[in-house]
Image (cartoon, rainbow, N blue to C red):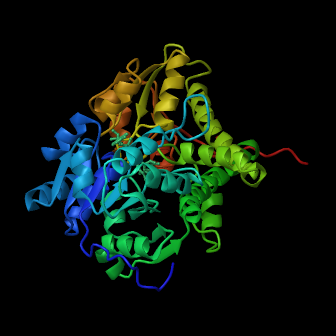
């Protein structure tokens, strides 16, 4: 931001609080303690705080439980529900609370963010930095920056910065300890220096740093998610064209991906994106852009969303077609509930959405997910849940692969074939070896793949 030495000294080895200890906040708190900082994690959810304090990560994230236990044993990490304690403790306070979609609107629900900033600000009476990590609509940080100074006993000494988070669930530890970039949205040299001190071990590892104004920092996050969502929906739009022409979307994706201007990552056709971030973030961005008078600039995001939702409907179509035209009474093994493998997160999960639609059309749906069954059951108690892959597929008329867990990729089509009532599979993620399944006598269907070698009608 500026090279001037800040007038107020920074805390060189800041004590940190992390407010909101969900997927993002728990990971951040644990990893910051692993890097040598003293950290206090705070959440309003007493059960979550009790679990974390006892060494249990209340969600599935590879590598995180081990890091939690190490951090607790080091004495550097504690958890609390007490905002007074947090306000006294921290030099730098990271706000990591949820920003879900508002019911009945595409806008982000900022109640939790506003409450977290307020609860800290009214209690802090000394120089400190509040850092937003939650994903928020552009303009939120600037508004909160003046609000916290108005309500805090510390007044102008309480500063605000924004540090958007790019971690991927399933790789959260690696992404937090070794991020591919850091973005600091700041308005003063002091905030930049203080935030740099909080990330010193990561910056010392030559992690690229972009220092920006607050609005740019907010925009980086939603722009990145919009780009990724667009790339996924782009190849899925091509899958729709493939379905109308007999072309093969997997070959198309391979051929496009070899062009290094395009690249193969996120160019994976299938059931599309979901989870607690991409869907709500592109909707909130679109909503916010309209408020700002630039709705047209991101109008394509509405189509990105629509393409994504159509893939779910089309997957149900494939299951119905394989079942002979009706789903009534058809036993479907739904493999996967989480929005992606290596996560137990079922927020806006395409897999569960498909399972629910199949159920509503009269299918008897048996869901199996290696990690997300408990969360899925909480959201959709009406579906049946199996305790294993074998239980799920036994007696099934159609198997639908909806989340590409390694366990499903590695399953033997011959052994599964002995368990099912009918060898019919819809591969919603292009995760199975189609040739092997066909060789084992399965009828294999996938989005964007020709079923018969049909010729498109001449133009
Ligand atoms: N999950 C991810 O992979 C990820 C990645 C990047 C950014 N984000 C963003 O991070 C934010 C948090 O996402 P998440 O997935 O961790 O959500 P989450 O729902 O898992 O966690 C949010 C936590 O905040 C707590 N909380 C709510 N109000 C609070 C308050 N006033 N004070 C203290 N705690 C409070 C909740 O109890 C919950 O534990 C969102 O804005 C999300 O878009 C998430």
Q: Image quarter for residue 446?
A: top right
On screen, residue 239 above or below 47? below
Q: Position of residue 431 (x, y in %)?
A: 46, 49
Please give the name of the residue rendered at 26% of the width and 62% of the height, measured from the top-left corner. 31
Image side of residue 37 versus residue 214, left or right: left
Counting the numbered discs, the total is 0
Please give the name of the residue rendered at 50% of the width and 41% of the height, measured from the top-left corner. 110
Image side of residue 441 versus residue 142, left or right: left
- In front here: 54 or 380? 54
- In front here: 279 or 30? 30
Whether residue 134 appears in this view of the structure is no
Image side of residue 297 versus residue 27, left or right: right
Whether residue 216 appears in this view of the structure is yes
Quadrant assignment for ligand 1? top left
Please give the name of the residue rendered at 32% of the width and 74% of the height, measured from the top-left corner. 10
Q: Position of residue 300 (x, y in %)?
A: 73, 50
Image side of residue 215 versus residue 163, left or right: right
Q: Position of residue 246 (x, y in %)?
A: 72, 46
Q: Position of residue 225 (x, y in %)?
A: 56, 55
On screen, residue 212 above or below 77? below
**Which residue is situated farthest in the right direction here?**
459
- In front here: 113 or 329? 113
């Amino acid at each position: 931001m500026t090279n001037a030495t800040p007038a107020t000294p920074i805390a060189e080895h800041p004590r940190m609080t992390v407010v909101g200890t969900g997927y993002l906040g728990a990971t951040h708190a644990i990893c910051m303690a692993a890097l040598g900082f003293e950290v206090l994690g705070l959440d309003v959810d007493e059960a979550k705080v009790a679990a974390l304090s006892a060494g249990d990560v209340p969600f599935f994230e590879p590598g995180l439980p081990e890091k939690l236990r190490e951090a607790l044993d080091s004495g550097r990490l504690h958890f609390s529900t007490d905002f007074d304690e947090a306000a006294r403790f921290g030099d730098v306070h990271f706000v990591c609370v949820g920003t879900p979609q508002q019911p009945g609107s595409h806008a982000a629900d900022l109640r939790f963010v506003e409450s977290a900033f307020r609860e800290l600000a009214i209690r802090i009476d000394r120089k400190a930095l509040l850092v937003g990590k939650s994903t928020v609509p552009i303009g939120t940080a600037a508004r909160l920056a003046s609000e916290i100074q108005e309500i805090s006993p510390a007044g102008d000494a309480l500063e605000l910065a924004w540090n958007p988070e790019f971690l991927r669930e399933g790789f959260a530890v690696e992404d937090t300890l070794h991020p591919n970039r850091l973005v600091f949205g700041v308005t003063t040299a002091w905030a930049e220096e203080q935030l740099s001190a909080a990330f010193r071990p990561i910056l010392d590892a030559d992690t690229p740093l972009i220092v920006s104004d607050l609005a740019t920092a907010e925009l980086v996050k939603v722009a990145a998610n919009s780009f990724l969502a667009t790339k996924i929906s782009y190849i899925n739009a091509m899958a729709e064209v493939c379905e109308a022409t007999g072309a093969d979307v997997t070959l198309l994706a391979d051929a496009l991906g070899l062009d290094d201007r395009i690249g193969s990552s996120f160019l994976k056709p299938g059931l599309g994106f979901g989870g607690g971030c991409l869907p709500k973030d592109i909707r909130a961005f679109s909503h916010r852009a309209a408020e700002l008078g630039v709705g047209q600039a991101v109008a394509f995001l509405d189509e990105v969303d629509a393409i994504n939702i159509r893939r779910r409907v089309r997957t149900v179509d494939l299951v119905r077609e394989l079942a002979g035209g009706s789903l009534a009474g058809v036993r479907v093994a739904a493999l996967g509930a989480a929005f992606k493998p290596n996560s137990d997160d079922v927020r806006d999960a395409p897999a569960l959405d498909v399972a629910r639609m199949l159920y509503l059309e009269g299918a008897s749906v048996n869901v199996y997910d290696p990690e997300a069954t408990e969360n899925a059951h909480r959201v959709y108690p009406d579906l049946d849940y199996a305790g294993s892959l074998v239980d799920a597929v036994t007696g099934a008329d159609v198997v639908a692969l909806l989340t590409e867990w390694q366990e499903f990729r590695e399953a033997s089509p011959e052994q599964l074939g002995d368990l099912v009532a009918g060898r019919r599979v819809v591969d919603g993620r292009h995760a199975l070896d189609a040739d092997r399944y066909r060789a084992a006598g399965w009828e294999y269907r996938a989005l964007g793949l020709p079923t018969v070698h049909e010729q498109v009608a001449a133009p």
